[in-house]
Image (cartoon, rainbow, N blue to C red):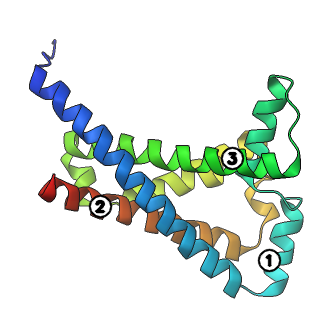
Amino acid sequence: MRIRRTARDRDGIGRDLIKGAIAGAVATWVMGKVTTSLYQREDRGARQREDSARGGRTAYGTAAEKAARAVSVPLDDEERERYGAAVHWALGIGSGAVYAIVRRRLAWIGRLAGVGFGTAFWAAVDEGLVPALGLTPGPRAFPWQTHARGLAGHLTFGTVTDGTLRLLDVVA
């Protein structure tokens, strides 16, 4: 069975990509505020265990460093964190764009209002892909607070992405 795409379908995908990128950026910003606030309120011992497990680096900074090393470009600490932040934002914006396309085409995903998206993203990326790529140690290296904060952050990301898309659907 062949699915025919019309010009209107292509325009819809383009609009969804743009809206999703906007929603992903908004959600990335809000998620950062939420997770930073939670981190600052965590038990000092849990924060120290997490920081020690990560070697004082972020997963995104480590990703930037590995990418730079692959092309033989050294990064200092400031560059590693700056490029790491760019990786973080690109992932959030890109994920928002993907979610915008998928939720429109698979209605059941949209009915979950971003909760399923946020949960799946946390489980697949934070708990699976990030340690598999060697960006952090495995999940057992971190205290439960780290996992709870990550889940809360990604639930925030998913619901804010979905809510922003719903708003953009009304106004744009």
Disc number at residue 104? none
Residue 87 lies in what quarter of the image?
Answer: top right
Tell whether 103 sits left or right of 123: left
Name which residue type carries label 1. Answer: Arg
**Which is more foreground, mark 3 or mark 2?**
2
Q: Nearer the viewer, mark 1 or mark 2?
A: 2
Along the polypeptide, which appears first: circle 3 or circle 2? 3
What residue is shown at x 66% (from left), y 51% (from top)? 85
Name the residue carrying label 3. 130
Q: Residue furthest top?
A: 2
Which quadrant would residue 9 be assigned to in this image? top left
Percent coordinates x, y for residue 155 in the rendering: 45, 66
Residue at (46% x, 41% y) in the render: 94
Question: Which residue in the protein does label 2 denote?
Answer: 164
Residues at marks 1 and 2 touching, judged by CB atoms closer than 8 Å: no
Q: Which residue is mark 1?
A: 47
